[in-house]
Image: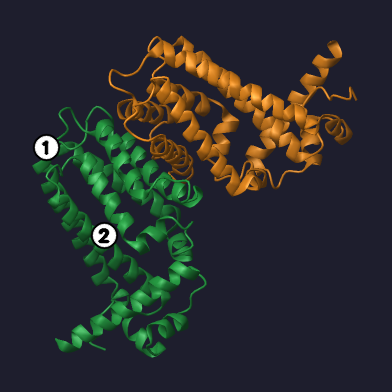
Chain colours: A green, B orange
Amino acid sequence: MVLLTHRQQRADRILDAAARLFARYGYDKTTVDEIAREAGVAKGTLYLHWSGKEALAEALLYREVRRVIEDFLQRLEADPEGGTIGSIYRHSLLATFANPFVRAVLTSDNQVLGDYLRRLGPDYDQIRFEAARALVERMQAAGLVRTDLRPEAIAYLLTMLSLGLASAGTLIPAAIAPPPDEVAIALADVVQRGLAPEGGGDREAGKRFVRAYLAEVIRRYEQLRGLRKDADDGQPSDSG
Amino acid sequence: MVLLTHRQQRADRILDAAARLFARYGYDKTTVDEIAREAGVAKGTLYLHWSGKEALAEALLYREVRRVIEDFLQRLEADPEGGTIGSIYRHSLLATFANPFVRAVLTSDNQVLGDYLRRLGPDYDQIRFEAARALVERMQAAGLVRTDLRPEAIAYLLTMLSLGLASAGTLIPAAIAPPPDEVAIALADVVQRGLAPEGGGDREAGKRFVRAYLAEVIRRYEQLRGLRKDADDGQPSDSG
């Protein structure tokens, strides 16, 4: 157990080092050598955890997204008004903006994860849109979202908003942009007015929906990771 | 007068040829020679109208944007419900989508006007955001837009929506995306619910505002063009 914890701490330290270098120099220009040096470990040690830069980037992205999800859930549960589509949108934006790495990925013109994200390519955009459509359909069934617009149309609007948020963060200088939290609150208010059903939606049903949905997303992702052993970030299945 | 009309017709024919080639091969890969050939005029004739490809692209973009503006105004005036922020948004999107060239510019990953648009660069994004902020402030004063959010925040949302619309058009395959008109109508409805003041806004004031604003935009642009004579697309001031 102590050994595992030590491994996990070392993995986290290496991921922290990679996050700093990716944010500063970008994914493409950062080498495994530099990550090992920044983390203060031998290159061979790094390879005990991951097969290479790509597997490491995947583990880093997963760790940070998990942190954003945890933060988001805490904010949502703590909000007495939480559970509407607007509050879900607001807290997910605030949690995203509060994570320096994820925020850098979203507002740095794709340099931070460069080739890694580009390799996901056009198929990824299509899969993401289909996933958004399926999610909207379920939110409509759960009474969180108005049902007089087709899920395709609402998914398109929500995809536009994420893509637009990323582009605006890249293109509009921070000095003239309003603070991120003001953007999140205004945007969430517009989403609530624009997409909630009559009456604003059932808050408790909304919270239940979010908990169940995110648990499912995490479970599926963990299954995928289980299938691809080389992406493991701490406990190789061959106990190597 | 007959001579002027002939010049104007020839200019339009050359611009049509350029629009076809830019849409097919992109701005960067299209040469002045090819445009002249496609239009069936001598290269020297083309230079009677414009100093080069950049001036021609500017004249083309201006002509097409003017067409979109005219189409938008006709749609807005013809709509008995027209004049709210939502209807302004809806008709401007429908007019934009109905123009093949402008639509191609917006949904082709910037290839259509390639270097021409890139040369406008970061300053352009900043100027555009400042213009959006000033416009929102005036729409708030005219009673078209709610005043409990700062103009900066609303301008940021509207900028996100335009950027997001362009990215979504590029990234989401048309085969799985909802039809553009459905997107325009859904988006306009969300904008109306999200950004209109209590009661929906004064429609007649809205129409007056739009007419005055667009007339001013066109007047200012014509002044700018008057200052840069080589961008003239029909009547050179030296009567050449």
Identify the residue position indicated by label 1 in the image.
A202
Quarter the C terminus of chain A occupies: bottom left
Question: Percent x, y for residue B138?
Answer: 46, 25
- Please report the residue visible at 44 percent of the width from the left and 70 percent of the height from the top: A22
- The part of the image, by quadrant, that contains residue B103 is top right
Question: Toward the viewer: A176 or A117?
Answer: A176
Look at the picture and state if B120 lies above or below B227: below
Question: Toward the viewer: B38 or A87?
Answer: A87
Q: Give the mark nearer the N terminus: 2 vs 1.
A: 2
> Outermost residue toward the left?
A204
Q: Mark 1: which amino acid?
A: Asp
Q: Does dot 2 land on a helix, a strand or a loop?
A: helix
- Please report the residue visible at 35 percent of the width from the left and 51 percent of the height from the top: A127
Look at the picture and state if A39 lies above or below A98: below
Q: Chain of mark 2?
A: A
Q: Does dot 1 land on a helix, a strand or a loop?
A: loop
Identify the residue position indicated by label 2 in the image.
A68
